Amino acid sequence: MRELVLAAKSGQCRILVGEKLANLPKYCGTGKIVIITDKSVSRLHSKDFPKEAEVVEIGLGEGAKTLEAVERIYRRFLSLELDRSAMVVGIGGGVVCDVAGFAASTYLRGLRLGLVPTTLLAQSDAAIGGKNGVNLDSYKNLIGTFRQPEFCLIDFAFLKTLPPQELASGFAEVIKHAAIGDQRLFAFLGKNSAALLSGDEGALEKAISDSVAVKVKVVQGDELESGQRMILNFGHTLGHAIEKTTRIRHGHAVAVGMAAAVQVSVSTGLLKRTEAGRMVSLIEKFGLPTKINFNCALVLDAIRKDKKRRGVEINMVLLSGIGKPVIQRISLDGIAGALKALDGA
Ligand SMILES: NC(=O)c1ccc[n+]([C@@H]2O[C@H](COP(=O)([O-])OP(=O)(O)OC[C@H]3O[C@@H](n4cnc5c(N)ncnc54)[C@H](O)[C@@H]3O)[C@@H](O)[C@H]2O)c1
Ligand SMILES: [Zn+2]
């Protein structure tokens, strides 16, 4: 087990990488434990939840990130007569972590919170950093708070029940963290892709803890996203637009988005072509796409509607080398050029 600490204004979080779910009560204190999970995670893993805990289930997937779901949770909290000594624990993917974090940080102006992320995406990204929230209509994460959980317990055993495509998708975020902040992790991922994809726990502990360490460092420097935290969006400007217009998995869309970002980095003269090639081959080693068939006009339109747009230019995270992110204003024309190069059609 490796322990990292994230210390920020909204609280301090112990990140326990490689800890076992069986040890969860150790971190919960003496108040009531209320687990928030979703139906799939509950079906597969609730037999291993602490027996003394109450369990609240939410629906599956992005559609469950609503204020209605949060209201149902509040009503359960009310019927359980929770006070501020209660510990709310979200056990699930990014959806559960976001909803549990929001419900816990708003009920009684804040109950205690712990997270047990169960997808690779949540273990390496979503559960770390203290952002939570729900969607409103088609607007993602419009409502939420910044609040660090007290702990984030990462048990690799959960990854064994994850569909292989879901695991691969999660590696996109690990690759993202390596690309923006850790050359050595980047090299490690290149050498150990097979071990990681087969669930080797030693390799996972190294990759996830180093990936988490990159996010921790960025969040500690800019918790409220006023500047540098934006580098965590590497691959996401295009990734989100591709995700919206093609409905492929988040990590797969981010993989294509990262390939596009290095393409733009080369065409603006920031990045050597050979470095861009290293990025593309690492993405491919994890079975993730770097090109797909998509409708260029629709993707550009989605980017235009992106809340980060200002005029005909947008802020984009580029690389000047592996581990060296640069935030630059890029014209939509520049992006259109990179998109054409990636269109697998
Ligand atoms: N707060 C943040 O900083 C942050 C960062 C990145 C992403 N997110 C959010 O995370 C969400 C996506 O997270 P996700 O990809 O984990 O999706 P998810 O939570 O919907 O999980 C994906 C699917 O996997 C299932 N699942 C979860 N754990 C499993 C396991 N161990 N075995 C088998 N099935 C399992 C879930 O039931 C679900 O059907 C998005 O809503 C996104 O906005 C938040
Ligand atoms: Zn992401």
Image: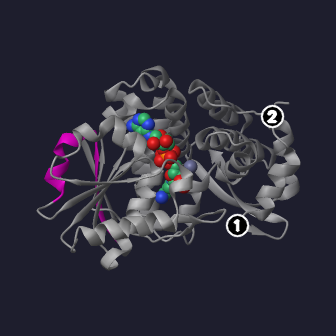
Residue at 46% across, 25% down: 197
Task: Provide the secondary structure element on which disc 1 rests.
Answer: loop
Q: Residue at the spot x=45%, y=59% of the render? A: 98
* Residue 266 location (% of width, % of height): 76, 43
Disc 2 target residue: 293
First-in-chain label (2 vs 1): 2
Distance from Cα at disc 2 to Cα at disc 1: 25 Å
Total marks placed: 2
User: In front of the other: label 2 or label 1?
Assistant: 2
Give residue 128's position: percent from left, percent from top: 41, 55
Q: Secondary structure at mark 2?
A: loop
Image position of 148 (left or right of 14)? right
Image-based side of 83 in relation to 101, left or right: left
In this rendering, the answer to whether 105 lies above or below 193 is below
Q: Is mark 2 within 8 Å of ligand 2?
A: no
Looking at the picture, does residue 62 appear above or below residue 202? below
Identify the residue under disc 1: 308
Residue 164 x %, y %: 50, 27
Instruction: State the extent of the magenta-drawn residues as a range.
Output: 9-28
Is the N terminus in the top left, top right, bottom left or bottom right quadrant? Answer: top left
Residue 263 coordinates in the image, percent (x, y): 76, 41
The answer to whether residue 24 is magenta is yes
